[in-house]
Amino acid sequence: MEFIQQNWYWAALAAVSGGMLIFTSVKGGAKGISPQEATQLINREDALVLDVRDSGEFAAGHILNARHIPLADLEKRLADLEKFKDKPIIVNCQTGMRSETACATLAKAGFGRVLNLSGGIAAWQEAGMPVSRKKK
């Protein structure tokens, strides 16, 4: 007890850090998956890849056959994804932060199998996975 009284700032820092860790793991709208797990889902279950980056980022390189709907337009274009409600949907952005928001939006709209590509397209490329620069 004396240690905590003398080092209260370290105890406070540990409590805040632990609280943030719990908050970020609970608030997430989707399970995070690795590029390897995403590849398996794409190949085995014909998962939809949804890229929520801006148009310029998408044009610079995206996952093969990814559907592009910028995060800002997602709520307005949910009807475009209606036929994929029962399929796994892998959502990606550049680093995995915007896609987390998109996952929460999709989950709220009733999409059952929404997955966030952990680390985004950056992790995908780092894992040596292919990207396309073709426009659809």
Image: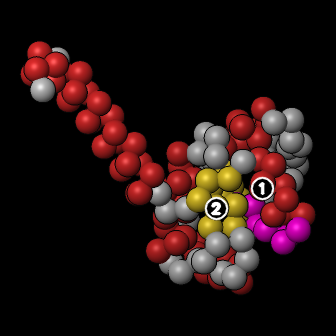
Stretch of the chain drawn in magenta? 44-50
Placement of the N terminus among the 4 image quadrants: top left
Q: How many marks?
A: 2
Q: Residue 14: x, y in percent?
A: 29, 30
- Point 81% across, 36% down: residue: 127
Q: Which residue is mark 1?
A: 38
Can residue 25 be seen in this snapshot? yes
Q: Which residue is mark 2?
A: 115
Residue 84 found in image quarter: bottom right
Amino acid type for the residue under numbered disc 2: Leu
86 relative position to 111: left or right: right
What crowding class fits label 2: few (fewer than 14 Cα within 10 Å), some (14-19), or many (20 or more)? many
Q: Residue 122: x, y in percent?
A: 70, 36
Mark 2 to mark 1 CA distance (whole Å):
9 Å
33 relative position to 109: left or right: right
Choose the circle earlier in sequence order: 2 or 1: 1
